[in-house]
Image (cartoon, grey):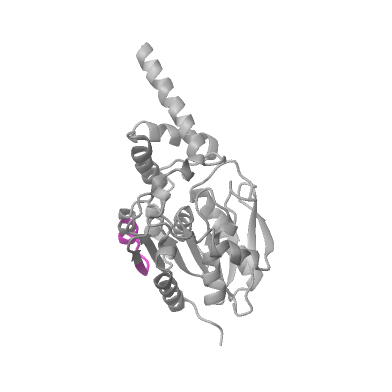
Amino acid sequence: MAAILICAGGVTYAGLYFYKVAVMRAPKVFMSNNPDLKSNPPVAGASWGEGQQWIANQQIRNLELVSDDGLKLRGYWIASDRAEGRTAIVAHGYSGKGKDMGAYAKIYRDVLGFNVLIPDARGHGESEGGYIGFGWHERRDYVRWIQRVIEETGTEAQIVLHGVSMGGATVLMTSGEELPPQVKAVVADCAYTSVAAELSYQLRRMYRLPSFPFLQSASLVSRIKAGYSFREASALRQVRRATVPILFIHGDADTFVPYFMLDELYDACGSPKERLAVHGAGHGTAYDTDKGTYIRKVADFIGKHTKASP
C-alpha cells in the first residue's frame, strides 16, 4: 500500500510540475536551451531581425476585445490603403507575442496589400490569462477576432488566418469552427497535430519519459486549472471538419514539431488544400530558409482564394 501511495504521489507531483512547465503562464526558460529550436546553419530569425525593425516603423492601433470567459485580449492593427477589405490575422507561437510576427505581417501588408491584425494570445504579451491554451481556447478567441475584423472593414471583408507553430495549430483549430463566409483561407506553418501528441513527443525527447502516466496526470491538472484536456485540443480533428482552403507549411528538418505531423494534418484535411515542405528548415524557420519560395507560395495560394475589389 505504501508503495502505491508513493507512486501515486509521484505521478501527481509530476502532473503538477509539467503543467507548471508547459501550460501555466510563466517564463519558458527551457525553450532557450532546446537544441530542436536552434537552426543549423544559423539564420536570422524572422521574428527578431527584419520583423522587429519593420514593426517599429509601422503605425499601429491597439484593439481590445473580451473573450467568452471574460479575459481582456489585446491585438495590434496595421492598416493598408490597398487592402480593399482584405485582412490577415497572424498568430504567434508558444511563449511569443503578436509583435514578434513582423516578418509575416510584412508579407501581407507590403507584398499583398492586406490590413494586418496581430493579436497577443491569452496568457501572452498584453493579453490577460494565467495559462496557455495551445490553440484550443484560442480558437474561440480567434472567432471573436474575426468578428472584430468584420466590424472594422465591413461585411465585404476577406480574411486570411496565418499562424506559425502554436499559432499554426491555433488557426487550424479555428478552421474547424463554424466560420463566417468572410474567412477565405488559412495558412498553417509547422503546426502540431494535437496537444497530446506534441507533449507526448516532447516528454520522450526532452525528458526520456513515456507519455503514460505523466501526460494523463498533467492533462488532468490542465482540465482542473485551465478547463481543457490535452486530447480534446486537436488540430487533426478540427481540419477534418474544415471547409476553408488550407495551406500547410513545414520544414523537413523540424525536430521540435516533427515533420511527419505535416503528412498527418494534410491527409486528414477534407477542404481544398495545398502543402509546402521547405528542405533543410528547422522549427519555425521555413520563411528564413527560403524566403522567395515561402512568399511566392503564400501569395499564390492567397491569390486563388481572395480578390481585390474592381
Residue 158 seen by the camera: no
Q: Residue at x 48, y 48 (%)?
A: 134
Q: Nearer the viewer, residue 293 or 202?
A: 293
Q: Where is residue 154 in the image (x, y as percent from the top left)?
A: 63, 73
Q: What quarter of the picture does the C terminus occupy?
A: bottom right
Q: Nearer the viewer, residue 252 or 175?
A: 252
Q: Position of residue 304 (x, y in %)?
A: 43, 78
Q: Is residue 191 above or below residue 78?
A: above
The verdict on residue 144 being magenta is no
Q: Residue at x 66, y 56 (%)?
A: 65
Looking at the rendering, the stretch of residues picked out in magenta corresponds to 264-275
Q: Position of residue 26 (x, y in %)?
A: 57, 40
Q: Residue 210 falls in which quadrant of the image?
A: top left
Q: In this view, does 50 lie above or below 203?
A: below
Residue 211 seen by the camera: yes
Q: Residue at x 67, y 60 (%)?
A: 63
Q: Where is residue 245 in the image (x, y as percent from the top left)?
A: 41, 69
Q: What quarter of the picture does the N terminus occupy?
A: top left
The verdict on residue 274 being magenta is yes
Mark count: 0
Q: Which of 269 and 289 is in front in this view?
A: 289
